[in-house]
Image (cartoon, rainbow, N blue to C red):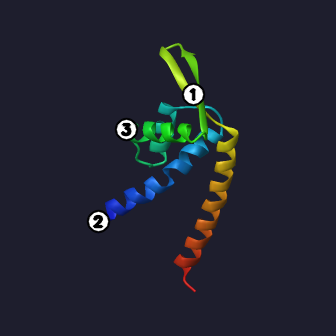
Amino acid sequence: MKLENAQVQMRKGILEFCILEIIGRGEAYASDMLEELTAARMIVVEGTLYPLLTRLKNAALLDYTWKESSSGPPRKYYVLTDAGRQFLAEMRETWDDIAVSVGIIRKGK
């Protein structure tokens, strides 16, 4: 097994959570999300982000609004729906539980 493959799978597993966290702070533009994820060393490309945003939108966790841009065509800004906020709250609890569990395992008995 290659380490790189395992790292990619770990990142994919938490990408949805990270995207919801970003949008949970307020409306977010996809390019800004990519920039923040990249700065956090979450290697993501547009071909990964846009299908995930569509899936979250189809699951009624996100909505979007179009806003005029001074530098080109209108931009799509994503926001969490009420269901999305609830889902994110539950994901946070899950993340906290996993972090504790992994911490216990890494320290040993």
Find disc 2 in the rendering and name its residue: 2
- In the displayed structure, 59 sits above or below 64; it is below
Specify which label sits upstream in the sequence, 2 or 1: 2
Q: Residues within 10 Å of mark 1 (few under 14, many from 20)?
A: some
CA gap between label 2 and label 1 equals 37 Å
Q: Nearer the viewer, mark 2 or mark 3?
A: 3
Q: Are marks 2 and 1 in contact (CB under 8 Å)?
A: no
Which amino acid type is marked by label 1? Answer: Tyr
Residue 88 locus on image (x, y percent): 64, 49
Type of the residue with mark 3 = Gly
C-alpha gap between disc 3 and disc 1:
18 Å
Badge number at residue 88: none
Q: Position of residue 94 (x, y in %)?
A: 62, 61
Measured as percent of width and height from the top left, residue 5 is found at: 33, 60
Would you identify the image quadrant in which residue 85 lies?
top right
Residue 77's disc number: 1
Which residue is located at x 52 percent, y 48 percent?
Answer: 16
Asked where in the image residue 108 lies, by quadrant, the reply is: bottom right
Q: Quadrant of residue 77?
A: top right
Q: Is residue 26 left or right of residue 108?
A: right
Towards the viewer: 42 or 89: 89
To which residue does mark 3 refer? 47
Is residue 98 rendered to the left or right of residue 4? right
Q: Residue at x 32, y 60 (%)?
A: 4
Q: Is residue 96 left or right of residue 8?
A: right
Q: Quadrant of the N terminus?
A: bottom left
Q: Are marks 2 and 3 in contact (CB under 8 Å)?
A: no
Q: Label 3 neighbourhood size at 10 Å, few (<14), some (14-19), many (20+)? A: few
**Crowding at mark 2 (Cα within 10 Å: few <14, some 14-19, many 20+):** few
Type of amino acid under label 2: Lys
Q: Nearer the viewer, mark 2 or mark 1?
A: 1
